Amino acid sequence: MALEVPICTAVSPVEEEVRSIDGTRIGFVKMGTGPAVVFVHGSLATHGDWFRVAESLADRFTCYLMDRRGHGLSGEGAGPYSIECEYDDIAAVLEAAGPGASLVAHSYGATCSLGCAARTEVARIVLYEPPLPIKRTITNGAFEQYCAALESGALEEALVIGMRSFVGLPAEKVEAMRDSSMWTKLSALAPTWPCELEAMDDLGGSVELYSGIASPTLLLLGTESAQHPFKEAVAALAKVMPHVTVASLPGQSHMALRTAPQLVTRLIAEFLS
């Protein structure tokens, strides 16, 4: 039986922070009451991408909406970018959330969460389309073109290249995004993408690292999402992770946090409950 998903009208978000292993400030917004759940956002995003989902869950879960390093409430970090530092950042927030905390993550945040879960105990995990270079690179040969657009100051042009080449969105969906209120925010975050893209491609096509993750895991996949990298990654993970369930998001692609938050909320609530 599907759970009802109420909107919690008594949410009082509080900003807090922890320090990662390298001393970087990792900020998060805490709301709700109940078992702890840490939320991790993807590329071109901040903790706010999870806010509508967390608001609906806050009557039964304590939600920790973290900002990844270099985003929102979190610091940049002193050294060169490393995805391993992202693993440490997530682990630091999980520690703050306490024993038995679960992990919910989207896109690149889900990729980082996989790496964290491979070496940190997590009660339950929900991953929405972690991009992994299973059969070919994430950047699809368009990395230089994307960076050139950034260097020339053409942030919107770069974003169009990225959405088409890296996310696999068809032209009509990209145009719809350009007409939405989110486009300005996405464009402003475009310079944060290259280091994350390089980190994903450096992971290579093997998923054996994740075969030791014993936590019950829910993989969310939009029926309209691109075969590469999302459907390929979910299929590969489902073959090696020992306690995994795959749930479809009918009619949705990679952006259901914005286009169908109640559907995402319901699936998360059913799994964590």
Image (cartoon, helix red, strand yellow):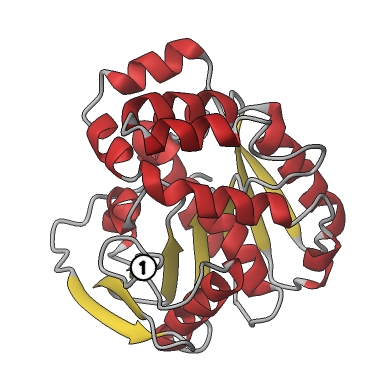
Element type at marker 1? strand
Q: Position of residue 114 (x, y in %)?
A: 65, 64
Disc 1 crowd rating (10 Å Cα; few below 14, some 14-19, many 20+) is: many
| Above or below 72: residue 185 | above
The quarter of the displayed image where residue 135 is located: top right
Residue 64 horizontal side relative to residue 160, left or right: left
Q: Position of residue 119 (x, y in %)?
A: 69, 80
Asked if residue 187 lies left or right of residue 2, the reply is left
Instruction: Name the residue located 57 percent from the left edge and 69 percent from the top edge.
Output: 82
| Residue 192 seen in the figure | yes
Where residue 209 appears, as percent x and y from the top left, is 81, 67
How many dots with numbers?
Answer: 1
Front residue of this view, candidates 24 and 252: 24
**Residue 2: horizontal and vertical position, in percent?**
49, 44
On the rendered structure, is 96 left or right of 136? left
Query: Who's the residue at 43% across and 70% down the image?
Result: 38
Asked whether residue 168 is in view, the answer is: no
Which quadrant of the structure image shows residue 157? Answer: top left
Q: Pick whichever, 6 or 90, lies toward us.
A: 90
Q: Residue at (54%, 53%) from the top-left corner? A: 196
In percent of the image, x 38 and y 81: which residue is there? Answer: 24
Among the 4 quarters of the image, the one containing residue 234: top right
> What residue is shown with label 1?
66
Q: Amino acid at mark 1?
A: Met
